[in-house]
Amino acid sequence: MSATGQDTGRRIGDVVLKVDNISLSFGGVRALTNISFTVREHEILSIIGPNGAGKSSMLNVINGFYHPQEGVITYKGQARSRMRPHEAARQGIARTFQNIALFKGMSALDNIMTGRNTMMKSNIFAQALYWGLGQKEEIAHREHVERIIDFLEIESIRKTPVGRLPYGLQKRVELGRALAAQPELLLLDEPMAGMNVEEKEDMCRFILDVNDEFGTTIVLIEHDMGVVMDISDRVVVLDYGRKLAEDVPDAVRANQEVIDAYLGVSHAA
Ligand SMILES: Nc1ncnc2c1ncn2[C@@H]1O[C@H](COP(=O)(O)OP(=O)(O)OP(=O)(O)O)[C@@H](O)[C@H]1O
Ligand SMILES: [Mg+2]
């Protein structure tokens, strides 16, 4: 999966994801109220807003972790009010989490390999019965994972247990696991939180490369406004579970309501 030189990305296409009037509550807590926005093919769309604004909840609705009380999600033309995470994965939606969710004792390579699970045709019994088939499939998956390792420049840590890696590299492995599923829509929940400047620059470059080389559509939650304004095609702003704005970065930056609620105040980096 090295650079192909193909001009696959940056041609924003049709609407691939439509979020329509989504409302989500937990008991008395209203996490999302009537949220609507669209994501276009090949786009990088950022979701920003203060802590507790509902950003992670929104990603959890998109990939089926949370089931909204109201509203419809339309993905690739198929409308539904709820789906399960494994269905989302099968339809080409992958994600990373705000708090790293990796198997700490397993190597970087094996963690990334788990991202192939939804694509494995033969289960363990089939593999035992038809050894040849299972083996062939395993080799193909391993080759794909090796290409991701190459792409993310983590050859030197491929055998290292993830728990021993510095935070920035763990985040990179988590991105690798999401990429292993060859997603069409990649949801990234604060992929740069807690990183130093150099690590952030690396992560930015990988996100842009994924978008550009594979044409992957990306929805990104990020608090670093420099990064958001730099890499996003459009930005959705949430505040207390409501949408304040949906626009190109320059317009969002100049929006007084957004400045008052978020940009003008200090917030977590
Ligand atoms: N599983 C849950 N059970 C109960 N309340 C929840 C749950 N998930 C989210 N919430 C609540 O929903 C609201 C939105 O939370 P969410 O995590 O989506 O915010 P966020 O914008 O991602 O914040 P942050 O920037 O801190 O990550 C908060 O009030 C939160 O406490
Ligand atoms: Mg969050």
Image (cartoon, rainbow, N blue to C red):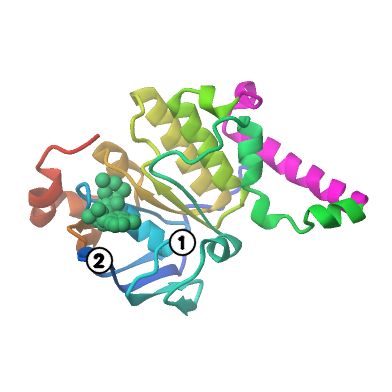
Q: Which residues are magenta?
A: 131-160
Q: Which residue is mark 1?
A: 63
Confirm if mark 2 falls within 8 A of ligand 1. yes
**Residue 2 visible (yes or no):** no
Q: Residue shown at 13%/37% (left/top)?
A: 266
Instruction: Tell me the distance, in whole angstroms, between the alpha carbons under discs 1 and 2.
Output: 21 Å
Is 138 inside the magenta-drawn segment?
yes
Q: Which quarter of the rendering shows the N terminus?
A: top right
For ligand 1, tell me if the residue under mark 1 lies within 8 Å.
Answer: no
Where is residue 38 shown, x and y percent of the image? 36, 67
Task: Tell me: residue 49, above or below residue 205.
Answer: below
**What kind of residue is marked 2?**
Gly
Q: Does the magenta-highlighted stretch encompass residue 95?
A: no
Which element is circle 2 on? Answer: loop
Residue 81 percent across, percent down from the top left: 42, 76
Tell me where residue 142 sits by quadrant.
Answer: top right
Q: From what the image shows, is residue 206 above or below residue 212? A: above
Q: Where's the C terminus, which quadrant? A: top left
Mark 1 falls on what kind of element? loop
Which residue lies at the image location 53% right of the left edge and 38% below the top edge?
A: 102
Evaluate whether residue 228 shows in this view: yes
